[in-house]
Image: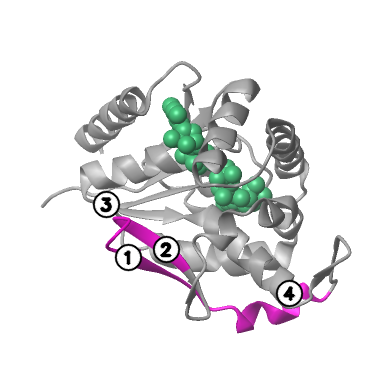
Amino acid sequence: MPKSINIAVDGYSSTGKSTLAKDLAAALGYRYVDSGAMYRGVTLYALKNGLIKNGRIAENLADYLEDMHLEFIFNRERGASDLHLNGEDVEEEIRELEVAKYVSDVASISEVRKFLVKAQQKMAGKKEVVMDGRDIGTVVMPDAELKIFVTARQAVRTSRRHGELIRRGKDVTKQEVEANLMQRDLIDSTREDSPLMQAEDARLLDNSELSLKEQLEIGLNWAKETLATT
Ligand code: CDP
Ligand code: CDP
């Protein structure tokens, strides 16, 4: 019987987690789950429904969680899954800087985490899942057979994310991008509930000097090693 594993990919903002996770999933024929997109989806709902006003998040945001139907639907054109929020494709919108500004505060709310972790664990239940985020190896899939913690130098991460936003036609400065990444990393790694940290049994991957192809090669070797010894 073929073996199947789950792979957890965690790390700081804009380190290349989702690209690595997506590429690993494609190479192994596994399902990719972007847990960050789900936190972004909740944040977008809050912005659209007046639950974030004048920079403040409504205290009762969690009361609305049951009204948020989040679903990943495959987009043939992109060759990847788009996040749908209550039936609408919001894949583009959740990547806006406005969403990025508030997402880490929304993700610090324990009820929000509980709600999304439950959905993520359901998706991981059948194995053959590669999921990326901040607490995947520590909380969502503590039993994942392979855990990767990705990091890269701050300046490299800023340039990569800035370049990506510019390519998508967004009018943002490097300074704005850097401030957002630093602010999110600080909130994500210091929050009380499931802070971002490297799981004890995770392998560290610094990809500052690595191409997408090189980082995939390393991840794939680890996956093959894990499959051979599981
Ligand atoms: O892609 P990027 O690194 O910019 O972030 P993301 O993966 O889309 O995640 C957006 C935000 O969601 C993070 O900055 C965290 O605040 C939150 N998040 C989280 O708390 N736990 C996760 N498992 C995934 C994301
Ligand atoms: O998911 P996360 O926010 O950690 O990062 P990402 O969206 O996978 O990657 C952010 C940007 O960095 C993308 O444009 C990637 O193509 C780029 N990147 C890169 O140029 N070289 C790497 N080794 C990793 C990512």
Callout 4 environment at 10 Å: few (<14), some (14 to 19), or many (20+)? some
Res 58 quadrant in image = bottom right
Q: Measuring from the top left, give residue 114's x and y in whole percent.
A: 63, 65
Which of discs 3 and 1 lies nearer the camera? The answer is 1
Which of discs 3 and 2 lies nearer the camera? The answer is 2
Which residue is the site of mark 3? 30
Q: Is the residue 204 above or below the residue 69 in the image?
A: above
**Residue 199 visible in the snapshot:** no
Which residue is the site of mark 4? 62
Amino acid on which the number 2 mark rests in the picture: Asp
Q: Measuring from the top left, give residue 134's x and y in whole percent.
A: 58, 45
Res 63 quadrant in image = bottom right
Secondary element type, mark 2 = strand
Residue 47 vs residue 186, the one in the foreground = 47
Tag of residue 82: 2
Amino acid on which the number 4 mark rests in the picture: Ala
Q: Which callout, 3 or 2, points at the residue further toward the start of the chain?
A: 3
What distance separates the C-alpha of mark 3 from that of mark 2?
A: 16 Å
What distance separates the C-alpha of mark 4 from that of mark 3?
A: 32 Å
CB within 8 Å, label 1 to label 2: yes
What distance separates the C-alpha of mark 3 from that of mark 1?
A: 14 Å
